Image (spheres, grey):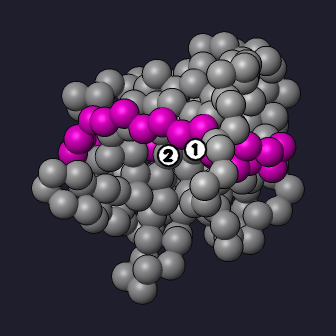
Amino acid sequence: MPKAPDSSNRRIILAGANPGLRLFDEHGKVTAFASIWMVDWSICGSGTAVVLWFDGVVRVVSEDVDLASWLERYFVRSFLEVQGLPWHEPAVERDLVQVSMNLAEGLSAKAADIQIEMGGVLDRRLFATDNFQLAEGTHSLSVVIAPVRSATVSIGGASVPGFVQVDGSADRPGSSAFLTTAEVWRR
């Protein structure tokens, strides 16, 4: 059996949280994807950002557009949740992103004309791997994840169609929408 690579010398590149969601239509097709970032520290700075895919358009919103662009390029484009979506170059918007989140109740985020709500926390558990593939290679990730029962996205006051898919078991529920905290990425 091959020996696992030593990840002990990997350096932290980001610490924070990255809740996310995918909404689906009744046929199982993704109608929206959102990645909400609360970066306490990273090699590219700190701040908040929202990356939203809806109707073939990618929007990146943050007060720090350089940080947000890096998050979208370095992380989000590599996430399995966006594979198969028509992912075009994003529209990058400089605007305030406000996020309120706790693992007991859920999340509320506002970025430009985008409003995201997530609630009904189903579980809280630790996830860790030394083999998370991003475009820049293999990374280590440690995160507390909390799948949620419901999520909504609205743009300019209009609700985006779709619903959260909840699966798994009572002991280990899963969801296409989740909160995170204590998220540490290393490379």
Q: Is residue 172 left or right of residue 49?
A: left
In this view, the residue farthest toward the bottom is: 27
**For the N terminus, which image quadrant?**
bottom right
Q: Residue at x 43, y 80 (%)?
A: 28
Q: Is residue 25 magenta?
A: no
Q: Amino acid at mark 2?
A: Gly
Q: Are marks 1 and 2 in contact (CB under 8 Å)?
A: yes
Residue 120 falls in image quadrant: top left
- Give the extent of the magenta segment: 113-139
Instruction: Name the residue that disc number 2 marks.
Output: 20
Dominant secondary structure of the magenta stretch? strand
Residue 93 falls in image quadrant: top right
Instruction: Give the mark nearest the N terminus, 1 or 2.
Output: 2
Instruction: Name the residue that disc number 1 marks.
Output: 35
| 20 or 132, nearer to the observer | 132
Q: Is residue 168 visible?
A: yes
Q: Amino acid at mark 1?
A: Ser
Q: Residues within 10 Å of mark 2 (few under 14, many from 20)?
A: many
Q: Residue at x 60, y 14 (%)?
A: 40
